[in-house]
Each structure stands twice: as structure tokens, then as C-alpha cells.
Image (cartoon, rainbow, N blue to C red):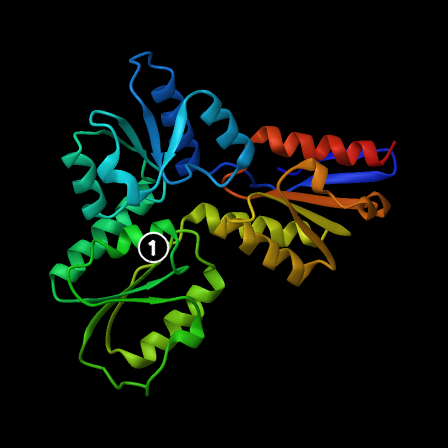
């Protein structure tokens, strides 16, 4: 259901689906619980828990510290370490266990399913091809579950070679959960021409697809779009790319203060948000747009 609000001459329309996804919400709740349990243990998240500065600042104020993978071997024994929604490789988990850390696994269930699939098919002799963003935490974690050949492709241009050149090889194709559905289909089509024994597993989170579809519908109704989210967030950047393709005016902001002044001139403004964006940030953006109309 569209949530609309008319602010004098401006109408603000929220996308049907926006903000926190299930996996991120689980991770944030796990961090809150760990910092409030009163045990006195040091609490870390393995890498930034979420691509949102305001949420990270609040969690850090409550005692959460960010732990880099390179520093695992020096973390105090017995510390609480939260594995974020992106998940980690078996090697990283093993290093945490050696330090006798109390591991809180907040890996998104959909990411965990991808990890299990990669382990299963690679153990059965399949080459694994994963569509995703190089150096993304989820991608690095999933790659660690491969027991054989593993390849990463970021777009259709990464697929090379003659058609059917490796037709007898068993190959399984999966994707990062926040990968572009459109790009996934392009890559899948090329791989089906290249490999006869190809198993395609669309592991994109349904919420990612729905979020994109919701944005497309939003773009039909507005003069401009505000995308709220961290500039380091893969799914937020893809929302911005879609918005720019289908709306003349589109901007990515991390908070309300970054909304350009020229947005006060638009009659209809659409708002969407990445999977790491809390309701409070969305409300602040709407309040700022309301001020533009006063």
C-alpha cells in the first residue's frame, strides 16, 4: 500500500517496500541484546554490522566495537563476536572458535542457504559461479564454502569464451542475495549457452526484487526520487541506479540534511530506502521534505 502525505504544494510518496530487510533487522536486534545482557563481556561485530552511520553510532555508544578480520587473533578470549547478516567463511569461524569467542551468528538465513548450496554442489564435483560484487562481505563468505573451482562474475561482460566450449563440465550458478535481478538473467542466459550441464539457482532475496519493482512503480508517479541509505551499501546503490534510469531526478542521501535544496521545487517526490535504513531515517527525510513546503 502506498503511503502518501501531501505537504502543501508537495506530495511525498513512499515506495511500497523500503527500509530494513529481515536479515539486517535480525542482526541489529542481536547486537542490541548482546550489548544489554549485563555480563560485562566485550562485544564486537565482525566488520560494520550495518551500512548506516546513525545506527552504528548508537550501537557503539552502547558498547559495540567493530572487529576487523585481521585482528581476530588478538581479540580478548571469551569476547562476544556478532557475525553480521553477510555471513563469514568457515575459516573465519574457526579462528573465532580458537579464541574461545562467544559467537552470535546473525547470518541472514538466505545467505546461509547459499553457503550450504555452494558446499553441497562443490563437494559433488560442480564448478561454482557466483554473481556478485567483488570484495563484498557476503561474497567472500560464500566463496569460503567452495571445495573446488570457484569463479565470481560481476556482470555479463565477465562471461567469456566460445559457446559450448565447456559443455560437459558440471556447473552451478548462484548469486549474491542483493544482486540485480536483471543482470542475473543476462548472465544466466549467457552461461546456458556455454554450459550444457548448468544448474541455475536464483538466490536473490525476494525482498530485493520486490524493492526494485516497487521503485519502478514509484518512478511512474513522481517528478523526483530520494533514495535513503549508506553509500557503501550494494543494494542501495542499485536502487539509485534504477531510480536514475527511470526518473530524471534521483539522489542518494544518508540523512535528511543531504537532500538538495532544489528538491523543494518538485510537486511529487518519491522516497525509497535500502535494506540497512531504519524507520527513523525515513521519517526524518519525510519531515525535511515537509519543511521544504512550508
Which residue position holds label 1?
A: 139
Question: Residue farthest to the front?
Answer: 74
Q: Quadrant of the C terminus?
A: top right
Residue 122 in percent (x, y) is at 16, 61
Q: Is 163 drawn above or below residue 281 in the view shown?
A: below
- Residue 247 % position (x, y): 71, 58
**Foreground: 96 or 127?**
96
State the residue in front, 257 or 280.
257
Which quadrant is the N terminus positioned in?
Answer: top right
* Image location of residue 194, percent across then percent down: 30, 80
Left or right of 256, for residue 157: left
**Compared to 234, does 1 lie above or below?**
above
Q: Decide which of 5, 88 is in the foreground and name it.
A: 88
Which one is in front, 244 or 252?
252
Q: Is residue 182 rendered to the left or right of residue 205?
A: right
Callout 1 secondary element = helix
Tell me which corner region of the image, top left, top right, bottom left or bottom right, holds residue 106: top left
| Crowd around label 1: few <14 · some 14–19 · many ≥20 (10 Å) | many
Asked if residue 277 is positioned above or below residue 155 in the image, the reply reads above
> Which residue shows up at 32% across the image and 75% down it?
192
Looking at the image, the residue that sits furthest to the top is 38
Residue for point 46% across, 45% down: 207
Q: Which image quadrant is residue 70 in?
A: top left
In the orientation shown, which residue stands out farthest toward the left? Answer: 124
Residue for point 36% across, 44% down = 86
Residue 53 position, x and y percent, is 54, 36
Give the residue displayed 21% in from the left and 41% down from the top. 93
Q: How many marks?
A: 1
Reply above or below: 105 against 145: above
Amino acid at each position: 500500500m502506498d503511503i502518501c502525505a501531501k505537504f502543501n504544494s508537495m506530495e511525498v510518496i513512499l515506495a511500497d517496500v523500503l527500509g530494513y530487510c529481515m536479515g539486517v533487522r535480525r542482526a541489529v536486534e542481536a547486537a542490541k541484546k548482546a550489548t544489554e545482557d549485563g555480563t560485562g563481556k566485550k562485544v564486537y561485530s565482525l566488520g560494520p554490522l550495518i551500512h548506516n552511520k546513525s545506527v552504528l553510532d548508537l550501537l557503539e555508544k552502547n558498547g559495540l566495537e567493530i572487529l576487523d578480520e585481521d585482528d581476530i587473533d588478538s581479540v580478548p578470549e571469551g569476547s562476544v563476536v556478532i557475525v553480521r547478516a553477510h555471513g563469514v567463511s568457515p575459516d573465519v569461524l574457526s579462528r573465532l572458535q580458537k579464541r574461545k569467542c562467544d559467537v552470535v551468528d546473525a547470518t541472514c538465513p538466505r545467505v546461509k542457504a547459499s553457503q550450504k548450496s555452494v558446499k553441497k554442489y562443490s563437494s559433488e564435483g560442480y564448478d561454482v559461479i557466483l554473481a556478485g560484487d567483488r570484495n563484498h562481505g557476503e561474497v567472500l563468505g560464500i566463496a569460503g564454502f567452495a571445495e573446488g573451482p570457484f569463479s565470481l562474475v560481476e556482470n555479463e561482460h565477465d562471461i567469456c569464451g566460445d559457446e559450448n566450449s565447456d559443455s560437459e563440465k558440471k556447473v552451478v550458478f548462484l548469486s549474491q542475495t542483493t544482486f540485480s535481478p536483471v543482470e542475473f538473467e543476462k548472465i544466466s542466459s549467457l552461461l546456458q549457452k556455454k554450459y550444457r550441464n548448468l544448474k541455475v539457482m536464483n538466490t536473490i532475496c525476494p525482498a530485493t526484487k520486490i524493492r526494485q519493482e516497487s521503485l519502478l512503480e514509484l518512478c511512474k508517479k513522481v517528478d523526483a526520487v530520494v533514495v535513503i541509505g549508506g553509500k557503501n551499501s550494494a543494494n542501495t546503490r542499485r536502487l539509485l541506479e534504477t531510480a536514475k534510469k527511470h526518473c530524471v531526478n534521483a539522489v542518494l542521501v544518508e540523512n535528511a540534511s543531504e537532500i538538495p535544496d532544489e528538491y523543494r521545487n518538485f510537486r511529487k517526490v518519491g522516497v525509497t530506502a535500502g535494506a540497512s535504513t531504519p524507520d527513523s531515517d525515513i521519517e526524518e527525510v519525510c519531515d525535511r521534505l515537509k519543511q521544504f513546503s512550508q
